[in-house]
Image (cartoon, coloured by chain):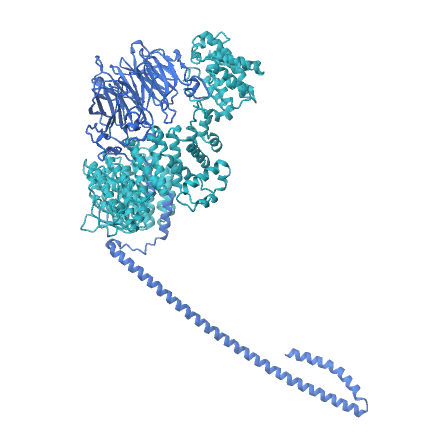
Amino acid sequence: MSYMAMSLHAVNHRLTNIPVKQLPPLASCLAASLSNCGELLSTPQSQKSKSDSDNAVQVHKLMTRLASLLQDRSVEGRWTAVVLVKALVEAGQWEVLRGCEPFVRGLIGILNKPDPVSTKKMSIITLTRIFHLTYQYPTLVREITTPSLPGFITAALNLISIKPSSEPTRKLKPNTPFVDIVLNAFAELIARHPTIFRPFTAQIHSVLQAIIGSTEPTYPESVLEIAQQLFVSLHNCAPKNTSGEEWKNACRMTIASIHATSSYVLRAVVEQWESVDPALRQLSMPQNYSQEVGNGPDALGLSSWQGLPAGVSRLVVLLRMLSKYLDTATASTVIIPLGSILDLCARLNMVTYPSDGEIQANQQIGRAEREHLLTELPRIHAACLRLLVDLVKAFGTAVIPVAQTILEQALWVFRAEKFSREVRTAVYDLVRVLLPHMGPCMTKQGVSSLTAVLRTCCHDLLPPPSNQAAATEKPDPKSKSKASQATVNADSFLNPGLKPGRQLSSSPTFANLKQASSELLVAVLSHTSTELITPALRAEIDRTIIITSDKNAMLASVLNPFANMQGRGVGTSIMPFLARSYSTEMEVEALIRPRMPVLMNGPGANGYSVADDDDEEEEETDAVLAPQAPTETSGFLKPSATPSLHQDMMDVEMTSSSSSPSLNKRSYAQETEVQSPARSIATEGAQSKKVRVESEETKAPAQPSLGAASPATFTGTAAISVPASSITATAAPKPVVSTTGPSASSSVTAPQPRAVAAAAETAGDDDSDDEMPTLNIDPDTDDEEEDE
Amino acid sequence: MLSECFIASTAASGKTPASASLRDVGICVHEFQPTLNLRSTFKKSSTAANCLAVSPSHVFAAQSEKAIVHVYSREKGNQEATVPFPERIRSIALAGGKNGDVVVLGTEGGRLILWETCTGRQIATTASHLRPVTSLVVDPTSNFILSGSSDASIHVWSLVDLLSFTKPPSGRDRQAPNSPIRTFSNHRAAITSIAVGHSAGRYNIAVSIAEDSTAIAWDYRTGRLLRTFLLSANATCLTLDPVDRAFYVGYADGSIQSVDFYKNQSIQHPLHDPSLHSTPVQPSAEDRWAPPSADSGAAHTLTLSYDGMTLLSGHQNGKVLSWNVGRKKYASTVADYTHPITNLIMLPPTGLSSPSRDLTRMSHTIVKPRYDHTLSESSQPAGTVPADYTFGTHLLPATASTSRPNQFTSAFTHAYFPESMLEEGLAELAAFDPGSTPGSSSGITDEEACAKDAQIAQLAGDLAVLQKKASIHATARQATTDEVTQLRADVAHLHDYINELHGKQAQAQREKIRRQARKEARETRRREAWFAAEKKGRKGDAVLTKMDAEDTVMTSDTDDQSSDEQ
């Protein structure tokens, strides 16, 4: 606190003593110290102690000085004041806000002065922030926001537009640097203060119409986006309880406007589409085909356009606006016309680039316009697919009823226009967002319909084929993708190590496309049933993943291993590649060396310290077993060809069998087991206990095969890693058997005699047999005594 | 503030509650942590087990022995609607992820009814169960419905197939539409309850209990049995650990049993170890936790706290008991609602920042099922979405993390202003000249300003051109004067040079004359000397050579003198 008081004092001192002209370079560091004084500035000022009153004086001094700086004659003074007011308001919260009325006045004043652009921009942001922060305190809203917000709106509108005195609308100023900031500020405030904005809706609406409908000087993407968002948000200002209706009308008008525009834009072809809405079926306006394509003011009141490029741009802007309806917050419950939106998308997606034969042409339109339209189609479709992506994102699981419809549209467009990078990116995104909602339920036909998309996706991710291949393929652009695909595959299967090294080419990278493709691969692997993906496709996906070293995709592939067919050998996993590429990542660690997700017993229930020790030693076990871990985990869920021993430890032995030197013995033991008929339940307590003793001996000879290099280490850890079962097993010769009986019963379900047989076999062969059991028993008995 | 609540529903009974606040109450929202107290109540409801479902906005309670569902609004705290259905409802579940937009109802007649609460669309399936559907769960991906019936079978339904307008291409053509995709029939008696694992992956499990005293863990994606547990009695209720490590069952005597999947420490996942699939397991009696008193009655329902360490059970005598999972025993009595408690649902804690659970939209009111046939498949051409298919919802503001940052938002949320913006401002200030734009813009409209700007710009251009010309002239003039002065200087210099040369010439002339004179004088002298020697009779030549020797000395002297003079 004393530090804060001191730094506040220092700020005050500098503000008053340094000439105003030299303040701006200091503003940043002054603001930083102010924002560090947050605690002091926001504490309620009581005059009780001396230090408190001193602080209060300092705060008051600071606020007065800033208020006067806001009115300062020099530009530098005002600039500094704006920066510091923002810092002060952010730090001080309510304590400062309640006295910030002079600031608000000063800041609005700056908007009307001929100050530099940055001063005005920062004033707008600061004012918006003040109004934003006061929103949670109704008294402050009443005292500060309500009186000054209309002034702010007018001043801000004056910055970007001119109001002819007679009309209620405004005319947009050309080339003003403030459009972005002002619209952002309005979008931030309009939902919270709808009644204050209500008188200005007509003015804002006219400005937005000019921005959105502008075809000649087009505005940057960011400005268009915020303008569309604000346009959608205008429904907040509708009189009481009609906002939902207002939203619906605006949305319907947008859809109608898109329909009208596309009727003109698509006039060069004969549309096959028939609306599901009877009202739209009669929508065929007479057109003058002799004129250049163009449209007058439409349902939304946007200005007219002339020429196909302008028409397509307008269509794209309107489609983007429609998706803004889906991701902008609404004032209340709205009725989203899902059916109409899908109908619209169906119409636009129905007209595709003719892959074969001639498109159904409208004979009244010249060939030039038709060709122009066909080249612009991917742009329209990409926008349309983006709309569907936003729709799926907004609806989440509620999209399930229409998910299949959307997917079919996407695949339809993809088939016709996969040459376009935008369309491909959009299709990948759309399929990716759809898969979580419908992937697990997909049937074989459903998954195979995605094959083309997935192949192209892999192709997009892979580095471009080598120059040689490209050269041979170039003369035939139509079949290029497929043919080069084949060559790449053949090459890479023959010598997979050679290619990636030479291919660090400088070809342009399409970040969006790459990202969409890799995310799609992750989604496909995690959300569709892996057994439905054909082996060839799966191999291609895995190959792509390995070459691109995409961690998420690798994880997805490992977590959803390829389900091998019956009798086709061991399933493969790309886990070694994952372990090599990302050995230090936490996910990989968790995957390869899982910490057993056992329910921890509470303290006192079963001896907290013991459980703890066990846990630690388990980790050691994991470390010892590390080299074998991949095979273990890839064997997860794998229907093994040989039936396994029905005993706890037998899992370890089985997984080790692949790497153990005593391979023959293991398999022989398993074979003997196959021959013996399965006896499912061993209920006889005494007998089973005896059997357990013997099976424990079975384990002992088995262990050297696991830890061939250091048998002693291994037996120690192995014995501890299976506390529950080994306790009962080794306890058998001792008199304490009866106490451990109940806990053992869960594990006593194996048909033991077979294990005995196996034990007999192995005991006969194994040399280290005689000393191992003693090593094994010691730690176990220790455990036993602790439990007692 | 961080708080955790549970919702309990009761079945009506003859008893009257002790406290007046619980009269008529059928559903209670009870704060569990940090302090135990009754938050709110919903009245006039009597539900059987598995007949309560809770979405973020609503509570759906299927009334026992009736064909109606009561819908309560959680925001308004009142009963919003009473929705009638053609059959008695025996179980209820919500599909649709975190929003819970689709209500799935299991009917007395063995069919499922799906009701989209945001659109009013309703779909009924075939009556695939032969007996009433008594338990329903929806898997975490909201793709599968698991329905258990008194006929001992469990059907797996594809939610996508049931709801989709366009029927996906399927190899299931031979089956009737809206029928289950898979049936699990390993139980031998009526299914009591089903619980589904918490994984969204393909190795998710389901656990079901039936009146044949078994609990079976199985893989609902393939229908494969994973493990059979032989319980000591008929379990009445079931819940699954949040990490799927164990499940808990309640018995008719009020006791609880925990069944730990990881009892056996194997390297493979114990449930997915194929060697163990055919082997039933008998959980030890030690894991059965006794109720505090014998009069608690049957445990009808179980639920776990968020951390999975506290188990709540609802009992016949109206008590909610809490059990400590770690200590494996009864902990305390949480609440007493007098009537038998049939459903307990733990709500996700409020106050935890979990972006995955943040809602992006909210349905404040439900749309009752519409019975008009515009939404049924028959009136529409196959596979199209009808134009009047509308979706009522409230889109909520996106959280800051989802929206893309731009200049405005980054400045807006910054403690003062981002460094880049300040630097830009400083640069502008440095370039800003207050004199150039006097404060006169207020009275001038912008067209004028524009026009003036243009004029000024033009004038400035002209001025620049003129200045350039003038400067060219000036430099040219400067160049000529320089040249002239240079020339003059050269001339003067040349004059000087000429004078100097003249002087030298004159001097050389004088020198020449003098040397001539000297030479003549010497000649004269030599001649005189020769004549004199001849006169004296001596050989004149000898005198001459003598004189020559003298002369060389002299001439060398004079030459030296003359060279000095020059």
Which picture quadrant has residue A228? top left
Of the pair A786 and A145, the residue shown nearer to us = A786
Quadrant in which the N terminus of chain B appears: top left
Q: Please name the color used to draw chain B.
A: blue
Which picture quadrant has residue B373? top left
Of the pair A787 and B441, the residue shown nearer to us = A787
Which picture quadrant has residue A460? top left
Q: How many marks?
A: 0
Of the pair A109 and A665, the residue shown nearer to us = A665
**Where in the figure is residue A361, as x and y percent of width and height?**
28, 46
- Residue B302 can be seen in this image: no
**Where in the figure is residue B259, as x and y percent of width and height?**
38, 16
Q: Please name the color used to draw chain A.
A: cyan
**Where in the figure is residue B327, as x and y percent of width and height?**
39, 15
Of the pair A583 and A509, the residue shown nearer to us = A509
Eyeballing the image, is A624 above or below A776?
below
Eyeballing the image, is A9 above or below A645?
below
**Where in the figure is residue A84, as x and y percent of width and height?**
34, 43
Quadrant in which the C terminus of chain B appears: bottom right
Farthest residue in the front direction? Answer: A357
Farthest residue in the bottom direction? Answer: B535
- Residue B62 can be seen in this image: yes
Q: Residue at x 79, y 91 (%)?
A: B534
Eyeballing the image, is A225 above or below B462?
above
